[in-house]
Image: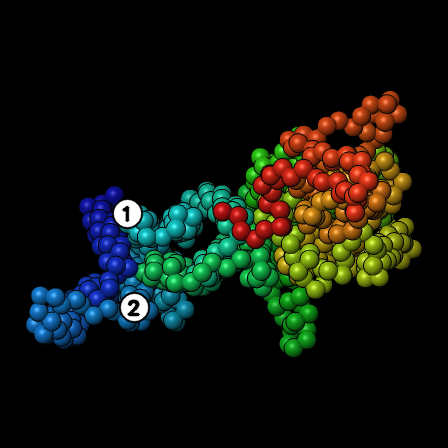
């Protein structure tokens, strides 16, 4: 049966009406403050459930006797539910009589239990509606459900469940928009929209476009959540719980959508939909919880932050894999298939770990995952760019975004496949598949000149402009690390016990050991790769070249593990811990280059008490102020030239020195005045008077420092 028939249109109208009634009942439930109001609300919900249950009983096996049974069922349930309502009304009437004209109804203290009852009835109502309308429309038959899991999947993964539920959530959000904080009203509305874009609710020929549209909306939700966290450093506990729960549900939903599309399994998606319903209605039915507790700083909760980061990453992995299958099924169909788990005990665990490793590395290196990550993290960089006071920082951020788009998405994926359709895939090519082109993987000989040119260009740029040419522009990592919300997490560099081991410009023992292990593994993998490609020995790791495996390990898996665990590993941990061999090579050139940080007046730094330059450093160079006071400049091979220290200086006293300033010095030109801030003047010493008992102390003018832009010196930003 199609929806264009009169009966189909009637079903649609009834479903829309029931969705509107449910939303109104949810609004009344959120406003119920007396026992009578709660009892009436529950009675109306039970009445709807009983009617749908009776309708389901009839449409499952139509007939005169079944119609009588359905009527008796509905009448019996409504009669039984009316009895508690009558008792509550009777007690309230007696209280009014005893209290007289000044009677005030007793406060309703059982709202949490009442909310649980409403939530249960809403879920049951939607589930019964999904089954009833599908049976009435002829799209299901009772014999199709052979187990409880099949009953759940068939009832939930249908347009008669998902679309009315989306309507209920959207209308409830509109009706309750004034009772909740505005940032989370927008998220509740996004929940309704994402529910409406559930692929199982649409015919197969529309599922692909719906996946793309839903993914675009999910990207917007992630950006909105991240920027909201940046703008609100302190949040009520209910907001923290809801945000983490929402992102966790979406991680499960993306995994469920992927399994539904790739494997035909809809159980995880159905379970995640029910979890999203519970999360939504639990929040809107009890809006008073927003006022029950004082806000707390989320930057002081590393476990919560790791949970948020992990949920976002899991959602992105499966969303990227789903987009790969939908948009490029020929290229990714075999690569992203989930291998069956075979064996028992340790063998099963080994197969699961290896399968997860290759699946994760394939997704994180795919075109659409990198494009999606670029949009999400790039949006946060745009927000930071708009806040920057220095044109130099703005230009660098713009170049960084352009470099990510070119070198992470366009050239290795799109351009390479267009220009060389018969060549091996991008990950099998040294220049494209793994950083710096070290090794002897396929095509290594033919691209040796390009590899050599890469080293020459990298070395020259690093010598002229410092390590930031790689670690803050050309690499894909800075786009992830330098957006507003992630940049705010640099406070974990000082609060995490592990991250504190890598603070300051000193190369600690842990740093040296990590760097030594990484470089040794790189050289060893390159030697094994050469032996394999020369035919001297057949050496592969998991069926791939050793250098390709090493790249997948470091940048396809380990990098994202370290990114997700920023609250424990610290921000920019690829630089602070020395485990990125690309950064290590750039670091060697950096030591002999022109780059350094300089100040215009050492006296200003000597009298500065804020230490904002050190607090804002994303790699934790805490010894920076001491060098400024003693020498007027600072050099460190760990400095990646982000420029946050320059932005954070309240006096505009700090600037980045590279080959441009070296040339200006040789020409006798000054470095230029501070931009966007007025440099305070140090008052000259007054000549001592003969009767003076102590020398006068030069004072520093005290202009009002400009507000820091996302710096780590404060926890609240709203």
Q: Dot 1 lies on which element?
A: loop
Task: Give the residue at x 78% y 43%.
Answer: 692
Dot 1: within a 10 Å radius of its alpha carbon, few (fewer than 14), some, or many (20 or more) residues?
few
- 422 sits left or right of 193 in the view: right
The disc at residue 467 is: none
| Number of the front mark, 1 or 2 | 2
Mark positioned earlier in the residue sequence (1 or 2): 1
Residue receiving disc 2: 111
Task: Give the residue at x 82% y 49%.
Answer: 584
Q: Between residues 19 and 55, which one lies in front from this camera angle?
A: 19
Q: Between residues 374 and 29, which one lies in front from this camera angle?
A: 29
- Residue 406, image x, y percentages: 68, 35
The furthest residue to the front:
691
- Residue 255, image x, y percentages: 52, 58
Position of residue 517 relative to residue 621, above or below, is: below
Residue receiving disc 1: 2
- Mark pair 1, 2: CA separation: 43 Å
């Amino acid at each position: 049966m199609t929806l264009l028939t009169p009966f189909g249109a009637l079903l649609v109208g009834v479903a829309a009406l029931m969705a509107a009634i449910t939303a109104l009942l949810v609004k009344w439930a959120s406003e119920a403050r007396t026992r009578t109001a709660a009892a009436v609300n529950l009675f109306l919900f039970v009445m709807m459930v009983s009617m749908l249950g009776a309708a389901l009983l009839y449409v499952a096996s139509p007939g005169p006797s079944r119609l009588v049974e359905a009527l008796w069922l509905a009448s019996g349930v409504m009669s039984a539910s009316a009895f508690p309502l009558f008792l509550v009304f009777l007690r309230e009437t007696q209280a009014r009589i005893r209290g007289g004209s000044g009677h005030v109804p007793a406060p309703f203290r059982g709202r949490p239990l009442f909310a649980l009852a409403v939530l249960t009835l809403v879920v049951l109502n939607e589930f019964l509606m999904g089954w009833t309308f599908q049976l009435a429309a002829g799209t299901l038959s009772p014999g199709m459900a052979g187990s409880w899991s099949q009953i759940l999947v068939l009832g939930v993964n249908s347009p008669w469940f998902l679309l009315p539920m989306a309507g209920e959530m959207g209308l409830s959000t509109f009706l309750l928009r004034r009772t909740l904080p505005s940032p989370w009203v927008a998220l509740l509305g996004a929940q309704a929209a994402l529910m409406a874009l559930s692929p199982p609710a649409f015919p197969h020929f529309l599922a692909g476009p719906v996946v793309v549209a839903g993914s675009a909306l999910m990207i917007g939700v992630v950006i909105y959540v991240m920027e909201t966290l940046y703008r609100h450093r302190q949040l009520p506990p209910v907001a923290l719980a809801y945000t983490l729960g929402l992102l966790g549900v979406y991680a499960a939903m993306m995994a469920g959508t992927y399994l539904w599309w790739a494997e035909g399994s809809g159980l995880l998606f159905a379970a995640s939909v029910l979890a999203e319903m519970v999360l939504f209605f639990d929040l809107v039915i009890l809006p008073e919880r927003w006022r029950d507790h004082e806000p707390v700083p989320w930057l002081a909760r590393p476990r919560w932050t790791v949970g948020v980061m992990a949920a976002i990453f899991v959602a992105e992995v499966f969303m990227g894999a789903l987009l790969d299958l939908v948009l490029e099924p020929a290229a990714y169909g075999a690569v992203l298939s989930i291998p069956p788990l075979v064996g028992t005990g340790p063998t099963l665990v080994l197969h699961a770990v290896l399968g997860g490793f290759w699946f994760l590395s394939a997704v994180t290196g795919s075109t659409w995952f990198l494009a999606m990550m670029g949009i999400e993290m790039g949006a946060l960089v745009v927000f930071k760019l708009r806040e920057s006071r220095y044109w130099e920082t703005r230009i660098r951020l713009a170049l960084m975004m352009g470099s990510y788009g070119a070198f992470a998405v366009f050239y290795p994926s799109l351009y390479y496949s267009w220009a060389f359709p018969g060549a091996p895939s991008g990950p099998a090519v040294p220049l494209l598949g793994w950083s710096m082109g070290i090794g002897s993987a396929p095509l290594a000989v033919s691209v040796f000149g390009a590899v050599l040119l890469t080293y020459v260009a990298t070395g020259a740029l690093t010598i002229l402009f410092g390590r930031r040419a790689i670690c803050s522009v050309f690499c894909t990592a800075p786009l992830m690390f330098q957006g507003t919300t992630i940049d705010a997490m640099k406070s974990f560099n000082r609060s995490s016990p592990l991250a504190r081991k890598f603070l300051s410009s000193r190369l600690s023992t842990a740093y040296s050991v990590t760097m030594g292990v990484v470089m040794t593994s790189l050289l060893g993998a390159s030697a094994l790769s050469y032996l394999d490609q020369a035919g001297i020995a057949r050496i592969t790791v998991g069926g791939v070249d050793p250098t390709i495996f090493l790249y997948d390990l470091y940048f396809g898996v380990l990098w994202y593990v370290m990114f997700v665990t920023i609250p424990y590993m610290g921000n920019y941990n690829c630089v602070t811990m020395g485990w990125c061999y690309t950064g290590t090579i750039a670091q060697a050139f950096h030591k002999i280059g022109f780059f350094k940080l300089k100040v215009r007046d050492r006296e200003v730094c000597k009298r500065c008490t804020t230490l904002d330059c050190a607090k804002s450093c994303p790699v934790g160079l805490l010894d920076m102020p001491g060098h400024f006071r003693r020498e007027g400049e600072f050099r460190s091979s760990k400095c990646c030239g982000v420029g946050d220290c320059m932005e954070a200086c309240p006096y505009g006293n700090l600037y980045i020195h590279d080959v441009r300033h070296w040339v200006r010095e040789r020409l006798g030109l000054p470095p230029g005045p501070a931009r966007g801030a007025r440099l305070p003047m140090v008052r000259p010493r007054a000549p001592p008077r003969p009767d003076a008992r102590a020398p006068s102390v030069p004072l520093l003018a005290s202009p009002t420092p400009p507000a820091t832009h996302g710096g780590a010196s404060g926890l609240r930003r709203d």
